[in-house]
Image (spheres, rainbow, N blue to C red):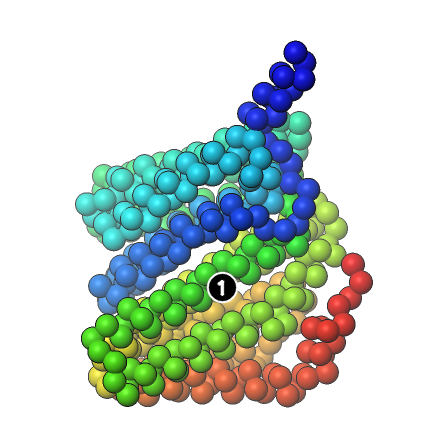
Amino acid sequence: MSTILSGRSARVSAVMREGEQVTPLELFFDLVFVLALTQCTTLVTHSPTWEGMLKGLLALGVLWWSWVGYAWLTSVVDPEEGTVRLAMFAAMAAFLVAALAVPGAFSSEALLFACAYASVRAAHILLFMLASREDEALRRSVLGLALSTAIGSGLLFAAAAASEPLRLVLWGVALLLDMGGPYLFGAEGWKLMPAHFAERHGLIVIIALGESIVAIGVGSRSGIGAGVVSGAVLGVVVTAALWWVYFDVTAIVAGRRLARAQEGRERNEIARDSYSYLHFPMVAGIAMLAVGLKRTLIDVGAPLKTVPAAALLGGAALYLLAQVAFRLRNVHSLSLRRLVCAGVLLALVPAGAALPALLTLALLAALLVGLIAYEAIRYAEARERVRHQPQPQ
């Protein structure tokens, strides 16, 4: 009888994670984020204004923070064991509804979005409470997160009943308070598997880059000619360059830094700052780039105009600036070359708004390829050492 009861108890409890490998269910969960990204970029593409850009970034920020919560959760519990598996499926459904509601999240579907978002976050908090039954420090951290989550969700419900511009203000405050919760309530009680945590965020960067590839296909629906083919090739070059900037060396060094950090507050703060916070501008930059790519492929010979040009060039610049901050946080070293490249891209926005879209995309590709070539040649020995002579754990 005790064995049967023990088995039943295991099924309604959370099993602590033991391995570092990302599980198939986590990858399955991340597929919902693909739709979320697509919906956010579509929102901006259909309304290529500064207000549309702001709305897209706010929606992406809220959905990003939802995803981040589950990245932390599944670095503590095994998502494929016990009740957690079913709860993850339920959270996926709520996340999907939130993503579907993005185009109307600031108008007709505002209440639906708020309800779906609150459901996603509530499931996250409940699972974390289940996982912290025997860990008082973790329980205190979860309670602090629950408070900031409740406030953020409440503000989104208030925004659903408000009119613009108050609605946008409430969204911004909700996002700031929700994301600021882990910073304000401290990082001592959290737990994570460093290799798993770093890999999970690397995979979400790949998913975001995949949205840029999808954007090329969406933008080229008007027909395939020499200009569209050239734009598609240049788009892949740009996307590959962004992949290289992150995965060639930076991700490796950051992952090792996280693994070497002392367990507890030091490691948790690095994970929070480097991954939860600084990966958002990376993903946001890629999403903005996708908007620019869509607009470019629609008509490669016409100028992009200001907002799409800012999305294309500014998105790449934002990605590079996030990389600069990412490196600074992990190895306390400032990458002046990436900082300069980001500055040049931002300076080119006015020209990019007037030049043919294909030429603007070519300039972006040339700058990124030039940056990568310089780094590969200038730091060849250090790159070789990092990539092929791993430091002992």
In the image, residue 339 sits, relative to residue 105, either above or below, namely below
Quarter of the image for the C terminus: give it: bottom right
Q: Residue at x 39, y 87 (%)?
A: 363
Estimate the x, y position of residue 219 in percent, counting from the top left. 27, 72
Q: From the viewer's perspective, is 46 left or right of 24?
A: left
Q: Amino acid at mark 1?
A: Ile
Q: Residue at x 23, y 39 (%)?
A: 161
> Which residue in the protein does label 1 denote?
206
Q: List the single residue furthest toward the right.
A: 392
Q: Residue at x 55, y 60 (%)?
A: 202
Q: Quadrant of residue 389?
A: bottom right
Q: Quadrant of residue 136?
A: top right
Q: Nearer the viewer, residue 296 or 279?
A: 296
Q: From the viewer's perspective, is 345 left or right of 300?
A: right
In the image, residue 41 sits, relative to residue 296, either above or below, namely above
Q: Can residue 289 be seen in the rendering of this structure?
A: yes
